[in-house]
Image: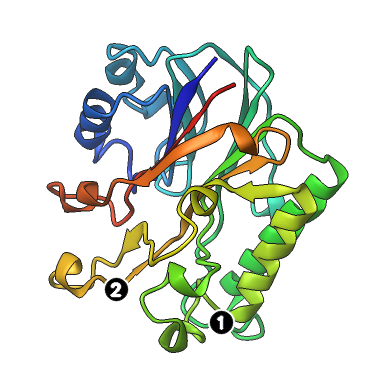
Amino acid sequence: MPFTLATWNINSIRLREGLVKRLLTEEAPDILCLQECKSPVEKMPLATFRALGYGHVVARGQKGYNGVAILSKLPLEDAGDMDFAALGHARHVAARLENGVTIHNVYVPAGGDVPDRMVNEKFGQKLDFVSEMRDWFSDNRPDRAILVGDLNIAPREDDVWSHKQLLNVVSHTPVEVDHLGQAQEAGGWVDVTRADIPAGKLYSWWSYRARDWDAADKGRRLDHIWASSDIAGAAHGSRILRAVRGWEQPSDHAPVLASFDL
């Protein structure tokens, strides 16, 4: 059952309903995982997406913050959620396809502005979230699994516009990169995007603060698609839809896609 999967931090599913509709119409991925939906599930515009063929939905919502949703053309069942770091946030949801593949949709906390947990509680929460995710997947070693989402960490030097200038900036600090690396190793996850595109600068997020984000191109690769080692070889066709960042009233993230022949 070959399928294409996309992940996108939409930054409000209700505000950007039209952009989601456009993506589903123009790109037609079989599965779309959304983060930062900022809406209770009952207020998400799911009827719009069902009309486009995405009749299967597994989601966790929250008023005004967080929120994760999996929209699918393919039948899937709810496979639960985890409250990593006990934050009480809607930041993880899982769904299982009929072929036994489990999809984990994750929205890691951004971590605030100061990379010091002693003075910034949010940074500590971010590290704890990733640590608990590491421990959970170590104890529940994934097989036939895909993990996607806004992980809010750019791990490689070529995942940011300037490694040197961002070493002390939240999302690329050594401690965050180390935590993410441990989580990836503990689960035996393969970074599908970088397996497909092993070299070169690669970004999925550009700040709203830049007057001309495209020309400045000060991006970071914060959005990821991982696969368990037993199915990683079936992944191909990875791409980041940079042009979507330039749509009207866009999210500051661009969708990331990969296909799987399973």
> How far from the left and from the top, in percent, is residue 95?
61, 25
Residue visible at 55% across and 14% down?
1
Amino acid, disc 2: Lys
Instruction: Choose top left, top right, bottom left or bottom right for residue 27.
Output: top left
| Mark number, residue 115 | 1
Q: What secondary structure is found at the residue carrying circle 2?
A: loop
Q: Residue 26 vs residue 107: left or right?
A: left
Tell me the crowding category of disc 1: few under 14, some 14 to 19, or many 20 or more residues within 10 angstroms, Cα based. Answer: many
> How far from the left and from the top, in percent, is residue 71?
44, 24
Tell which of 182 and 118 is nearer to you.
Answer: 182
Residue visible at 36% across and 56% down?
204
| Labels 1 and 2: the sequence-earlier one | 1
In space, the residues marked 1 and 2 are separated at their CA atoms by 20 Å
Task: Identify the residue under disc 2.
Answer: 218
Tell which of 221 and 194 is nearer to you.
Answer: 194
Q: Please determine whether, in this image, residue 130 is positioned above or below residue 93.
A: below
Please indicate, yes or no, whether residue 9 appears anywhere in the rendered image: no
Residue visible at 68% across and 25% down?
79
Q: What secondary structure is found at the residue carrying circle 1?
A: loop
Amino acid, disc 1: Pro
Colouring scheme, one of rainbow, by chain, secondary structure, one colour = rainbow
Split into 4 quadrants, where in the image is the C terminus? Answer: top right
Q: Residue at the far right: name it.
A: 139
Residue visible at 20% across and 49% down?
243
Count of numbered circles on the image: 2
| Mark number, residue 71 | none
